[in-house]
Image (tube, rainbow, N blue to C red):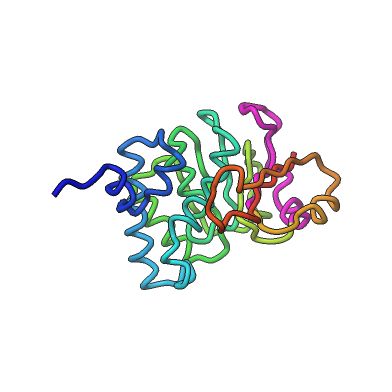
Amino acid sequence: MNISPYLCLMLNPVHLLIKYFPELSAEQISSFEKAVLLYKEWNTKINLISRNDMDNLVERHFLHSLAIAKVIKLAPASKVMDVGTGGGFPGIPLAIIFPKVDFYLIDTIGKKIKVVQDIVEQLGLKNVKAEQKRAENVKKIRFDFIVSRAVTKLPEFYSWVQHNISTKQKNKLRNGILYIKGGDVLEEIALLNKRFRVFELSQYFEEEYFETKKVVHLY
């Protein structure tokens, strides 16, 4: 029986990533497929991701993280810090997409960082370092971008990381914070008195989950 190429695509566990990032190489697709299996295996041992969310792992964690890759194509040799990475989001999906960018993933929960380190090692991601650390304790290291998925309110987050933003430009977007967040963000942004841009994820992804989701660029 012949199976149509479209059906083959839909049967692929990472078909949503292929849909929105058709430029993915076979190696990158394989890495995402392997990552899905690793997360499912680890989630039986430690509650990295809500068990109710596991059925939507690719959409709500992988694709959600890759919203940043829709907002900016990171230049080679860029440096990115992912604060409050949890199970490795958005850092690990971004590291697969941008193999020539250096990623530093931090979280205060040691058992989650150990899982992230294992997944990074099993995926062979040479461009990722993961450590148990508070953002306030990252000293004298500068990054082009600080990324995160809504670990706290924006003013508090900015106070943690403002000293880590490099003044040397490599990318088309100004160096700063790329913050993935849902709902109304303007009230929080107004407290900062910083320049900003809000990217609505419904511009990039048609799934209902993304209707109220945003990437906030603070600079």
Which image quadrant is residue 183 in? bottom right
Which image quadrant is residue 184 in? bottom right
Can residue 139 be seen? Answer: no
Residue 115 at x, y percent in the picture? 41, 61
Can residue 172 be seen? Answer: yes
Residue 154 at x, y percent in the picture? 74, 55
Q: In this view, does 200 lie above or below 55?
A: above
Q: Is residue 43 above or below residue 75?
A: below
- Residue 111 left/right relative to 157: left
- Residue under the image location 64 percent in, 27 percent down: 172
Q: In this view, does 63 lie above or below 111?
A: above
- Residue 136 left/right relative to 55: right
- Residue under the image location 43 percent in, 66 percent down: 54
Stretch in magenta? 154-180
- Residue under the image location 53 percent in, 54 percent down: 207
Q: Quadrant of the C terminus?
A: top right
Residue 205 at x, y percent in the picture? 54, 47
- Residue 46 left/right relative to 79: left
| 24 vs 171, nearest the viewer | 24
Residue 36 at x, y percent in the picture? 36, 57
Tell me how many marks there are. Answer: 0
- Residue under the image location 70 percent in, 49 percent down: 161
93 magenta-colored: no
| 108 vs 43, nearest the viewer | 43
Seen as rendered, the residue at the extreme left is 1
